[in-house]
Amino acid sequence: MHIYELSEQPKFLTEDLAIAKARDTLKADGLNPAAWQPFPYGQTKSPDGRTDEFFSRNTNTINEGSIVFTNSSATMRIVRVQLEGSRVVCQNWILKD
């Protein structure tokens, strides 16, 4: 688990912030973020009405969700991202068959 302190509390967890912190988590776990691409989802919307292209937002708790990443070997990882006030909490794990 990784915790990232923000300089101020955002109104909500944006997809851009979720992706950035998910990539930071991949790097912190010893992976090359450039080798992992977010997998399109497009099923949820942010509070400002924008469609989340990659972020699978929890529809009951808008400040948490997950991003699935894939690489050239078709391996998949999921990073769970949650905004708690002015900090972002992330956890990364590999998806197994």
Image: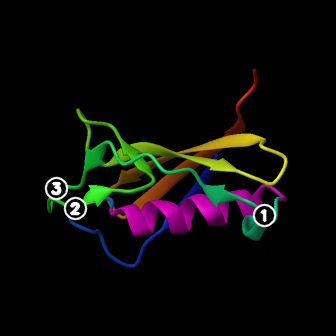
Q: Earlier in the sequence, mark 3 or mark 1?
A: 1
Circle 3: is it few (<14), some (14-19), or many (20+) Cα within 10 Å? few
C-alpha distance separating marks 1 and 2: 27 Å
The magenta segment is 14-30
Residue reaching furthest bottom? Answer: 7
Which quadrant does the C terminus fall into? top right
Callout 3–callout 2 Cβ contact below 8 Å: no
As helix, strand or loop, the secondary structure at mark 2 comes to loop
- Disc 1: which residue: 35
From the viewer's perspective, tell me whether residue 64 is left or right of residue 68. left
- Disc 2: which residue: 50
From the viewer's perspective, tell me whether residue 51 is left or right of residue 48. right
As helix, strand or loop, the secondary structure at mark 1 comes to helix
Circle 2: is it few (<14), some (14-19), or many (20+) Cα within 10 Å? few
Viewer-nearest residue: 91 or 31: 31
From the viewer's perspective, tell me whether residue 86 is left or right of residue 39. left
Q: Which residue is rendered at x = 33% and y = 63% of the image?
A: 14
C-alpha distance separating marks 3 and 2: 7 Å
